[in-house]
Image (spheres, grey):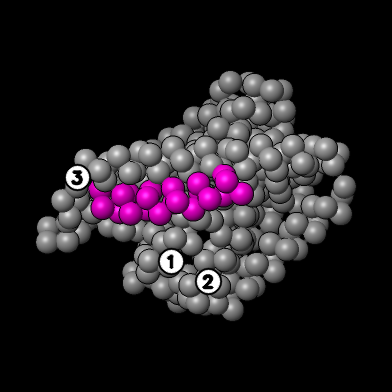
Amino acid sequence: MAALAVLLLASDWFIDAAEKIGLSFGVSPFIIGVTIVAFGTSLPELAASIASVYSNTSEIVIGNVVGSNITNILLVLGLTAVVGKEIKLNFDIWNIDIPLLFGSAILLFFAMQDLQLSTGEAVIFLLALCGFLLHSVMGNTVTDEDRPKVRAIDIGKLALGGVMVYFGAEYTIYGIKGFSEEAGISPEIISLTFIALGTSLPEVFVSLSAIKKGKHAIAVGNVLGSNIFNTYAVMAIPSFIDDLTIPAGVITFSLPLMLVATFIFGVMTISRKISKYEGVLLLLLYGFFLLEQFKSI
């Protein structure tokens, strides 16, 4: 409970400071969500995946990436749409952002078909991430009159908020992982469900905080950017430490479901809004995903 309370407080600090600092540099709210907020909230996924390689349980990496991406779309977006009644977008993210998200999901799907991630594929992933970052930052600015002045306290709140989000999620993960291991659940199932849920908690709290403040663009950008970061960085970086074990079960069900969830997300944003009822549909699909995972226990 204490870790969850830390996440709640830290997400508020992080979102406010990130938006103010980003706006001061002329960066739009959506791009702030896609980059600063998304990557900050994805740090637990990266930390958990690197730790799993060092502990010789590298099968957790793919489960963590796929499970987190599914959780971000179905649970995080679903909860955000239900709590906020509706997620509104005042711009078209189909011009480049959604296609880039689709591209990352499709690239992961085909890269995993041989049950390994080669060094060359890992390098391609990181280059694709750099390209996404460059595109996001370039040409997405706000007018000078919309730029607030940044104070030292804003920078401090961003740094402290990010650290608190990270450790709040980490301690929550430890509790969830300990419980699941005592229950005798396989690492593959743990990574797809418990660890994926634990590492996605920052996205949950940051997106809910953003939607309550009326910052819909940050909420959507957070999910979109987090999934791209997970696919490219969280998958690639641990592979440079050691070869990754890719369980066949992830490829046959969870990875295709991640593709389906990604395309559903894209279709829902064509109208530039995600309704409360569409949010309920996403949550029902997440429930289906969990039921399918626990059937194999």
Q: Identify the residue position indicated by label 2 in the image.
A: 83
Which comes sooner in the sequence, label 2 or label 3? 2
Q: What residue type is labelled 1?
A: Ile
Disc 2, SS: helix
Quarter residue 189 falls in: top right
In the image, 166 versus 264, the foreground residue is 166
Label at residue 81: none
Q: Which of marks 2 and 3 is in front?
A: 3
Can residue 281 be seen by looking at this rendering?
A: yes
- Residue type indicated by callout 2: Val
Residue at image point 41% right, 73% down: 88
Q: Residue 234: x and y, percent?
A: 54, 36
Looking at the picture, tell me which residue is in the foreground, 229 or 44: 44
Residue located at (49% from left, 53% from top): 8
Mark 1 against mark 3, which lies toward the viewer? 3
Res. 228 visible in picture: no
Q: Quadrant of residue 30?
A: bottom left
Secondary structure, mark 3, is: loop
Q: Which mark is residue 211?
A: 1
Q: Report if the CB atoms under discs 2 and 1 are less than 8 Å apart.
A: yes
Q: What stretch is highlighted in magenta?
A: 1-21
Residue at image location 58% in from the left, 20% down from the top: 241
Q: Which secondary structure dominates the residues rendered in magenta?
A: helix
